[in-house]
Amino acid sequence: MDTGPAADDANAVSACFRACCTSGSVPLAAPKSAFATSLVEIHDGPASAVFLGRFNGAPVAVKRPKLPTKAEIDRYHVELRLMLELTHDHILPLLAAHARPPEYFLVFPYQENGSVASLVHEQGWRPSWPAVLVLLQQVASALAFVHARGYVHRDVKPSNVLLDARWNATLCDFGLAESEEALRASLQNAVYSEEDAEGKTVAGRLIATLGGGGKDVGGPSSNRSKPQSTGGKPSGGFQKQHMVGTLPYMPPEVLMRRVPSFSADTYAFGVSACEVATGIAPYSDRERNVALAHTIMDLSYNESDLAVAIASENLRPSLPSERLKEDETRNEGSASPSARVAADGVSRLAAACWALDASARPSFERVLAELERVVDAYKKTAGLREAAPLEPRWSPPAREPARDADEVARAADAGLFADRAWPPQRDGRGVAPVRWPKLVSDSANEGSDSRNGCFHSGVFSACGARGPDKMEDRHVLASDVGGVRGAHLACVFDGHRGFECAEFCRRNFEKALVSAWHDCATPEVALTRAFESLDEAFLDAFERSKLHKSGEPKAERFPGCTAIAALRWGARVYVANAGDCRAVVCREPGARGDAAAAALSADHAADTNEAERARVSATAGPDALRVVNGVSRVGPAGLAVTRCVGDGDCKPFGVIATPEVTAYDVDEDDFALVLACDGLWDVVSNADARDLVLDTVKEPSMSAKRLGSEALARGSGDNVTVVVAFLKKTSTAETVTWERAF
């Protein structure tokens, strides 16, 4: 993916397709081939996907916005102009762009230490107080610069703060940024439906609770003419322009439909500062009957308990000083005086930043001045030289082997992740054979019938108690599989003895499935062939690679992974499973008199599955099974499962990759499908999973996060990866019961 002359040619082009963005130093029409060859996807969000690539010899992050409409294309050009204008040491710099149809890209330096949110919540990173203070200073300086240029970021949060190789913070994702002047001017375009089913808007209730004031839109006191009611949802442009961002970081005035200002970023900074200092996701320590604080709401609706509590009760996260007290109790000791100084200082600053009165929040010049005072006090208390820069002492978590850009590239060169010569598509066919069930597209009447093909999915993944260097799970979420509209795929791969097999499956499963279905009479046979061909291909690739001969003191490694795949094809979901991952369908309360949750797969565990033990014994003899610490295991390796991909040393002992496939007819009462590795199912029952999904704000990624967080809270000792797919169109927010809320 290195570039040569192509990059030089691109540098001569300094304008976007519309000619609204120009640059004398940043190529704005860099050929896609310069950075978009053999990209590795590292993030897939609702608005954009991010890929790992190379540009001018260096690893880069290639952001590909999802631009289905003209409005999103307009937003892309706004972000492009901002990135060209906002040049600062702690703002992620733009290296290049492809600002021409049909595809648009933004190219940034690859920040190998990832986001602060990922480090804190997925890898268990607890930065020292010096690290917290330095990080806050760097982010505050970036925001002071942004505000001085007249812009509001509108989505400040730890996941939008990246750390480079030297652990310097860079603020990123300006996709929602807008000039403060434009935000104020756009107020006149705000139009609402003022009535919900009960005749009052939530915003109106909030305004009434707080005594009104401010430039609110809608509500009981509004004199606007009432358009046709739309069930309480915004009907005009205000929601699209202003009700954006991430709920726990959104200030009360925005939740009350007031125009955001610079102080909105200050509020989000305060919440983020608290999150970094405590290691606690905002409001996640609260009981659910207080607030749905563990969720992030899609603000197409504004009816969340959390939104109400933030605006009317001034609900805020736990402060750093409280974390310090918890640490003292846990460690049965006393915190150092310098830690107390830092905790108290960050607590005061956070409380000032998230003040209910937006006008009382400090500017970022004041934030920087306060942080400097806290740093000076910390140095004095800790006995450090006041003139010396504060040493962050990051103490970063151990990194999983072969994860950075160069190592992944070397692995690819070694052949481990090399493309397999799968059976080619014949005659350019882009649809399945007629022998397959008729596929009903979910585009025309989505939501009218659960059987129309809806498959709105989200994922959550965390390292768990095993630590960040042992993250071996992978997943796949794909729509329009093989170019067939309405064909949806979700997979979870739980690696063991290394991440290599799970990564191989992630990169190649869809390809294997698409290749298989052109020669297979049914989806069941195609899924089976995909599993078996992946197993064969991985064993061959790994044998040819030298990674398992990398000088480790142990014997040769034989990585493998359990795998589960769900293919939604028309009115059916086909689930293929090899191992102890599990798929569970969740049903509405009282549905058909059936169980609320039903497993669509069987766990292939050597200790609990009698049929699998019999199969292994019949295939490889009774000696293939042995008891370790009272638990049945397979072969000398002591494998816990009897089916999986990879694990070449266990194949002679009856371990196979052939999945068991279940075809399930989706019913109108089936609202969700949960796929997860055993890290969830070890501590969460099928029924509990269904209840947690039903009890969570109706957005699949947040449902997945709720399940994963619950597994970690219950003490799961394994990696946890959860995919939740909604099987019918579902509201993205819960309805507030006002009488119950307060």
Image (spheres, rainbow, N blue to C red):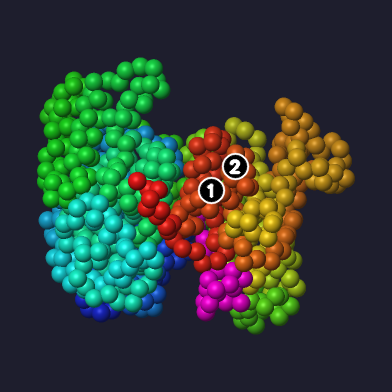
Say which of 346 and 421 sits in front. Answer: 346
Say which of 512 and 325 sits in front. Answer: 325
The image position of residue 681, as x and y in percent, is 62, 43
Total labels: the figure holds: 2
Position of residue 145 in the picture relative to residue 17 (left or right): left
Q: Residue at x 55, y 66 (%)?
A: 728
Tell me which numbered mark, 2 or 1, is placed earlier along the sequence: 2
Q: Residue at x 32, y 36 (%)?
A: 318
Position of residue 456 in the picture relative to residue 24 (left or right): right
Q: Residue at x 25, y 79 (%)?
A: 18
The image position of residue 253, as x and y in percent, is 23, 55
Residue range in magenta is 440-461
The image position of residue 294, as x and y in percent, is 41, 46
- Dot 2 falls on a residue whose secondary structure is loop
**Quick check: is 441 in the magenta stretch?**
yes
Position of residue 476 in the picture relative to residue 139 (left or right): right
Q: Amino acid at mark 1?
A: Leu
Q: Residue at x 45, y 54 (%)?
A: 697
Q: Which residue is mark 2?
A: 684
Is 369 rendered above or below residue 426? above
Q: Which residue is mark 1?
A: 692
